Amino acid sequence: MSSSITTLSYLRPYAERYAYYKKQSTDLPCTIRPNPFKLRLHELFQSKEESGMTQILNGDRFFEPDFKIFLNRETEAFATPMHSHDFVELCLVLEGKGYQYIDECLLEVQKGDLFLLPVGTSHVFRPNSPDKASPLIILNCIFDLSVASRLQDWIPEQSELIRYLYAPARLEQRWFRHADKRGQFLSLFNQAYLEYSERPAGFQSMVTAILLQMLQLVHRVQLERNQEAVPHEAPRENIDDALYFIENHYSDRITLKSLADRSFMSVGHFQNQFKKATGQTFNHYIQHVRIQKCCQLLRTTDKSVQQSANEVGYSDMKFFHSLFRKITGSSPLQYRKV
């Protein structure tokens, strides 16, 4: 891979277009925002007379001098005009239904719809109706292309994600859309928004890491779409989702069927793919996860053996003691003493 993805010959025309949008956007009028966390898009437009034209927004109006990422939670309104911008926008429909105009396309949108909109893409969201009881709420994450350049060490230059970011004109569809049915992007968006809003120490690094994780996830979704034509092959993403679910719900009653249903597979097919990915059966894997979590409690807390067992999902103490010894080679009390 070259030292800089922006030096690729096929990206140069787009770099010129990016420079054009950067220059054009600097001359647009903008009201001064008193609080960057409460910024609303319609505050950037002066009057209704301007609503018929496409506005070009400049990232410098949103970004801080040393941090080129901005997040907000926007309740969409009919007053917001069509606009484009010199930054990339990753947005998720958090609540409600409505429409999004992208270039010449009109799309119906609903909760869970995710969009990646490159530099220069004209778009605007519209709610279904002006009824405030049914708002269309969007989580926005906008960022400068310089942030995305950190992906060059991990994602191939010819990948669709790189083309979406740097050369969308080379794609049949210049923007990306995905239905976040399993809530992966929602979870990451919420983490990033919380960090950005509350601003604890090191929040810039955390927000940047989460954004890069979301872009990696976009790349993964694109790869899986390209592999959909392969018969009887479960996307690795589905198994990763199952492992993530186990990691966060190991103390609950998780069944093989429930995970297979979440992964949109039959029980038998899921079981085969799970073992292929982990080297273990579903039952063995979840038992090892629970015992590992119990070991952590025994090492780091004063909770009793029974409390620790209950906390990781075991109520049958006879079965728990037998399983603990089988996996660790010692009893819980012996393990704690060691």
Image (spheres, rainbow, N blue to C red):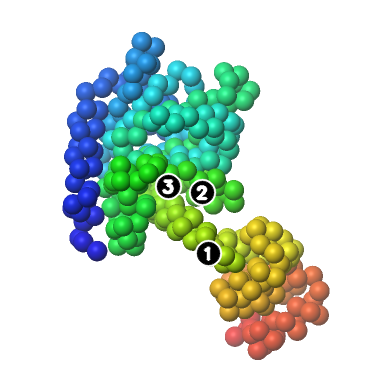
Identity of the residue drawn at 40% across and 29% down: 104
- The nearer-to-camera label among 2 and 1 is 1
Kind of residue at badge 3? Pro
The answer to the question of whether label 2 and label 1 lie on touching residues, with beta carbons closer than 8 A, is no
Q: Nearer the viewer, residue 130 or 222?
A: 222
Q: Is residue 295 above or below residue 248?
A: below
Identity of the residue drawn at 32% across and 44% down: 168
Report how far apart the C-alphas of labels 3 and 2 lie in the structure: 22 Å
Quadrant into which the N terminus falls: bottom left
Identity of the residue drawn at 62% across and 78% down: 280
Residue 200 is marked as 3
Identity of the residue drawn at 41% across and 52% down: 215
Position of 179 with respect to 57 (left or right) is right
Q: Look at mark 1 in the image and give the residue it sits on.
A: 230
| Sequence-first disc among 1 and 3 | 3
Q: Look at mark 2 in the image and give the residue it sits on.
A: 185
Task: Give percent across and percent down for residue 284.
Answer: 67, 78
Quadrant into which the C terminus falls: bottom right
Report how far apart the C-alphas of labels 2 and 1 lie in the structure: 25 Å
Label 3 crowding class (10 Å Cα cut-off): few <14, some 14-19, many 20+?
Answer: few
